[in-house]
Amino acid sequence: MKNNTWGLVDAFFDQYNLVDHHIKSYNDFVNHRIQDIIDITESIVLEQGEYSVKTGKLMIEKPFTKEADGSKSQIYPTEARLRNLTYSAHMYLEMALIKKGEEEPEFEKVYIGELPLMLKSDICHLKGLSYEELIEKGEDPQDTGGYFIVNGSERAIVTMEEIAPNKIILERIGEIEDRRARAIVTSIKSGFRARISLEYRKPRKSGVFLRISFPYVPGEIPLVVLLRALGLGTDEEIITKISDDFNFQMVVADDIQVSEPTLKLEPEVMEKLSMEEKREHLINSAIKYIGNRVAKGMTEEYRIKRAEDVIDRYLLPHIGVEPEHRAEKATYLAEMTEMLLQVIFEMREPHDKDHYTNKRLRVSGDLMEDLFRVAFTSLTRDMTYQLERSLARGKEPSVKQAVRSDVLTENIKHAIATGNWVGGRAGVSQLLDRTSYMGTLSHLRRVVSPLSRSQPHFEARDLHPTQFGKICPNETPEGPNCGLVKNLALLSKISEGSDPEEIEKVIEKMGILDS
């Protein structure tokens, strides 16, 4: 039995590397996610649509360094460590400046900046080298890779623990008798994160029970107003969409009654309208209400356009960001409301946030995706400014001259070098622990919770039964970090995410789902 067990362990390590989760995630980021970010970034438009910039494919070259005499040479990690350099790849993007009414020019290959490289990843020179070749290049053959070299320092990106995205999480606020609860969804699409929070609370006087908040809309708005804006025009559509339960319907009916005055509907105008006209009037009034929140003081036309844009792009973006997905979003919110009301009426238990089914681990590729998206947006803004400046001076605009590669390079390098990430998080990248080989492995398999260290968070710090086999039950620091800094168990493996469209195709092929 003992021999069989160790044979199984050896077989596991023959197939998997201890830092596979970082390397595979980074490879996915480089091979697919960067191109996706570039493709979905809004294109640059200048002079009221007179000029526009079109982007094509991204090319990444293996690491090389430029010497003072202008010569180029391949750079290996050992040299980067000794010379205090950044081990990084050069990125080139196909770009074309299109003038309205003229034929589209061919793409130019434009240098956009450097990307710090993870050791042993697909674009690293060490990938696929034998034991002897690694020794020849000055590397330890036992070194696992999975970290970066920035300004000569070895930096590791620590795995972050978070609540599962694109999943409804129900929680009670206070005691049961307080009758307060919240449903939260962290909606993620191509690295963009939108937190949608639906809360039920008894109003102090006459007010709305169900209120919702989502990005770019200040404060909270009544849920029924948002459902109207998504296309559920009549009271009956809203009530029946949410639930068949009479108690739930009464709560929603009360909310509809209270919300009517907020839409500024004149009874004498409503009486003159047909059923379909009334429905359209209510939908438009709801969009105008949201427009007044997101673009107060602007023209009515702009307020309506901005409201529709916010609903499409920032409300549940994982469902879709086009106007045709509004009906699906309304259905999703209606189901979310019913689940929340079931918690209030004690027909359903709230979720256990510490259960590992409700958690996800964000590894290097996910965190680099956040960073690259923000850095690339900064680059496009800077390009817009440079091109507008050229046009204002009467010069012929050039894409190559407009791209300042330092913008992207410095944004990414600074974050990895300091650990200060986008979204105000600190300590995301850390100086790699080289105290011992075991210390290095432990650091690369560390899992950090985003919860505040100064708060008790007793339940979050506890060893949860669902961590069995996934998280080491013993390895955690003493003091304020206890239970919030954890380590992966030796035989645990983080599975990579899959493309939903691919899964759908497979299911259709099997005949389970109609196409």
Image (cartoon, rainbow, N blue to C red):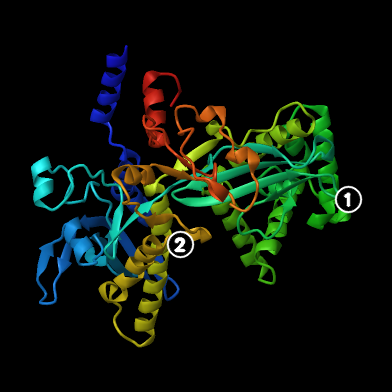
Q: Is residue 149 above or below residue 145?
A: below
In the drawing, does residue 265 fall left or right of residue 8? right
Q: Secondary structure at mark 2?
A: loop
* Front residue of 369 and 311: 369
Whether residue 50 appears in this view of the structure is: no
Question: Which mark is nearer the camera, 2 or 1?
Answer: 2
In the drawing, does residue 199 fall left or right of residue 41? right
Whether pointer 2 and pointer 1 mark residues with C-beta atoms closer than 8 Å, the reply is no
Percent x, y of residue 407: 35, 70
Percent x, y of residue 454: 62, 53
How far apart in space, not on screen, are marks 2 and 1 (Cα)?
42 Å
Q: Which residue is mark 1?
A: 204
Query: Residue pushed farthest bottom?
Result: 393
In the drawing, does residue 347 fall left or right of residue 493? right
| Kind of residue at disc 1 | Arg
Query: Residue pushed farthest top?
Result: 1
Q: Secondary structure at mark 1?
A: loop
Percent x, y of residue 385: 40, 77
Mark 2 packing: few (<14 Cα in 10 Å), some, or many (20+)?
A: some
Q: Which residue is mark 2?
A: 420
Instruction: Find residue 78 and report its image quarter.
Output: bottom left
Query: Residue pushed farthest right?
Result: 205
* Front residue of 179 and 392: 179
Percent x, y of residue 150: 30, 62
Q: Is residue 463 above or below residue 403?
A: above
Give the residue drawn at x 41%, y 33%.
Answer: 489
Give the residue drawn at x 15%, y 60%.
Answer: 75
Image quarter hosting the N terminus: top left
Whether residue 302 appears in this view of the structure is: yes
* Front residue of 468 and 360: 468
